[in-house]
């Protein structure tokens, strides 16, 4: 349960950083918060299987977006962008992860994160802002990759977290 709460909290804080600080908040959340959620998704993928994974992860993503909106109605576009970006990203990341399920955690976690990060960086901009800026997308992608490697190191190497 604590992992779900941490995932939701990181997701919601990331949304509000973007709402309050615009592209600078987007870049800050791209370094620390969004990569945390991508790495946590991998732990969920190991624990939940098949329809359970799809339903639970989808519910968590939608819950975070709805909570964002309920906390501040001005965050509507951010909430929609986050939900769409994360759902699309989780689908592609989940497919990659499943294809590499027998590989090392390093390969399947960071590979699936890279795929999901790319999808999220594109979809979020279109849905939240109705536009696409290649420079912001590239900046987000790079920051999220470094953030993902950081969180992989913290959660899998230092804390040695495994699915429960």
Image (cartoon, grey):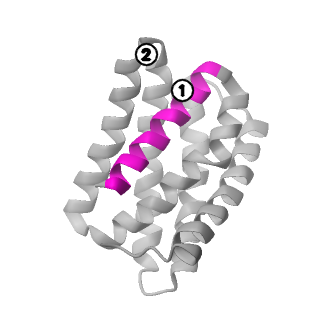
Rate crowding at label 1 as few (under 14), some (14 to 19) or many (20 or more) other CA atoms within 10 Å.
many
**Mark 2 touches mark 1? (CB < 8 Å):** yes
The quarter in which the C terminus is drawn is bottom left
Q: Judge from the rendering whether residue 73 lies leftward or rightward of residue 54; answer left or right.
A: right
User: Residue at the location (39% across, 74% down)?
Assistant: 98
Q: Which mark is residue 16?
A: 1
Answer whether residue 15 is magenta in the image: yes
- List the single residue furthest toward the top: 74
**Label 2 – label 1 distance at C-alpha:** 9 Å
Residue 38: percent from left, percent from top:
50, 56
Extent of the magenta region? 2-20
Rate crowding at label 2 as few (under 14), some (14 to 19) or many (20 or more) other CA atoms within 10 Å.
few
Question: Most prominent secondary structure in the magenta stretch?
Answer: helix
User: Residue at the location (58% across, 21% down)?
Assistant: 19
Q: Looking at the picture, does residue 97 appear above or below residue 29?
A: below
Q: Nearer the viewer, residue 30 or 114?
A: 30
Q: Nearer the viewer, residue 153 or 100?
A: 153
Residue 114: percent from left, percent from top:
60, 61
Residue 158: percent from left, percent from top:
58, 74
Look at the numbered disc 1 and give the secondary structure of its residue: helix
Reading the chain from its start, which is encountered first: label 2 or label 1? Answer: 1
Q: Which mark is residue 72?
A: 2
Determine which quarter of the picture holds residue 24. top right
Answer whether residue 36 is magenta in the image: no
């Amino acid at each position: 349960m604590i992992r779900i709460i941490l995932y939701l909290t990181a997701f919601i804080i990331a949304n509000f950083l973007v709402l309050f600080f615009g592209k600078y908040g987007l870049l800050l959340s791209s370094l620390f918060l969004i990569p945390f959620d991508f790495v946590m998704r991998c732990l969920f993928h190991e624990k939940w299987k098949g329809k359970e994974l799809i339903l639970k992860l989808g519910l968590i993503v939608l819950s975070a977006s709805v909570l964002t909106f309920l906390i501040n109605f001005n965050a509507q576009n951010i909430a929609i962008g986050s939900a769409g970006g994360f759902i699309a990203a989780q689908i592609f990341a989940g497919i990659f992860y499943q294809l590499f399920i027998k590989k090392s955690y390093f390969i399947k976690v960071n590979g699936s994160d890279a795929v999901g990060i790319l999808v999220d960086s594109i979809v979020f901009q279109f849905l939240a802002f109705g536009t696409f800026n290649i420079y912001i997308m590239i900046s987000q992608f790079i920051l999220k990759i470094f953030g993902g490697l950081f969180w992989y190191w913290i959660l899998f190497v230092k804390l040695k977290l495994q699915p429960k």
